[in-house]
Image: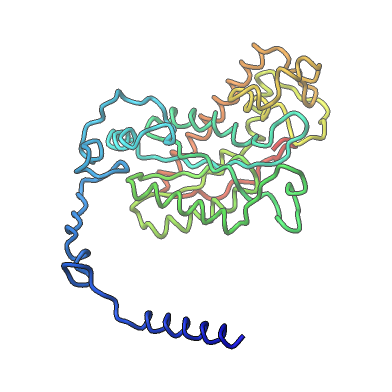
Amino acid sequence: MTKTITFTTVLLLSTAVAYAQPAQPPAGGTPGAAQAERPPQRERDPRTMGGGDCSANPYNCKDTPNPLPNNPSVFIEEMTWMDVRDALAEGKTTAIITTGGIEPNGPWLVTGKHNYVNRANCEAVARKLGNALCAPNIEYVPEGSIEPPSGHMLSPGTISLREDTFRAVLTDVAHSLKMHGFKNIIFIGDSGGNQGGQRAVAEELNKRFNGDAVVAHVQEYYTYGVVSEHMQKQGITEGKSDGLHDDPIITLNMFIADPKSVRYDERVKAGKATINGVDLSNRAKATELATKVVEFRAQYTADAIKKAIANKGTLPAPPPPTRLPGQ
């Protein structure tokens, strides 16, 4: 036992002495010489854009012509950075920020209902305006308390944001677009719970930007009562409500974006392609009506956007819209 302790003590002392010795410089130089010999970093080329360095490839330079034909899309996420740059230079300086939601919508409609609606409508609105692009849709919005669950959060599949998180996302997206040169930044939301946050953020940013860009919330996009009245003249007459978070207008608006989003083929096969007494099983007729829904909403919203831009900000809140069961 004594020998073991003595050996261990000697080993520990030897190790301590070794660590106490000053570090020896590398052969042929002094400490830090290797770092000092590194070439200085090259300054970033001020023309750099596109995710790389301008000096590495001319396609990373802000003034390099786009090597591809004009991109006809109005969705920023479907465009290259050069496409967006060129669109801005051509005068497409209005950006539309849509907000949707992930929530329960009965047995027929998928949880991304509002996001499908926005996909169809934003393109139509942008083309009506002629000088606009669609920012990526904001899919996650306030849907109720997360814990304990409330509102739509009581149903599986729902994803909710806190109100302050939602407003922070709106703020950063709008600010990003402003920094790239967009002069008019428009919020439109397809869900009732989105409206207050959009209005508050638009008003705050409009003050902060102080004329450098107009930020406006356009409430008129979310006026399903007006759309319903118009579509009654087009032949949609609802009967007794099915009591679902669904209705013919929003079903048709989703259908034009993607029939799968309303489980169309399965419903027709099962004899379930009706909502609130409106039969949608005739595909050609459903397509015709869906096109009219999008056309009306796009024109109504585009007109409201023009008024908001002329007003240099959000217009006074209109009377509360008639909120149908499906919205």
Q: Is residue 208 above or below residue 74?
A: below
Which quadrant holds residue 211?
bottom left
Please provide percent x and percent y for residue 227.
63, 30
How many marks the image carries: the answer is: 0
Rendered residue at 31%/25% (across/down): 70
Please give the name of the residue rendered at 32% of the width and 45% of the height, measured from the top-left corner: 181
Query: Residue 258: where, in percent of width, then height?
Result: 61, 24
Residue nearer the viewer, 204 or 300? 204
Q: Residue at x 77, y 25 (%)?
A: 275
Image color mode:
rainbow
Residue 226 position (above or below residue 181): above
Instruction: Name the quadrant of the C terminus.
Output: top right
314 with respect to 260 (left or right): left
Residue at the (54%, 31%) spot, across then down:
119
Of the 4 image quadrants, the one containing the N terminus is bottom right
Instruction: Name the foreground residue: 26 vs 183.
Output: 26
- Report x, y in % for residue 157: 71, 42
In the picture shown, does residue 5 fall above or below 90? below
State left or right for residue 208 relative to residue 124: left
Q: Which one is in front, 83 or 304?
A: 83
Percent of width and height locating residue 310: 40, 44
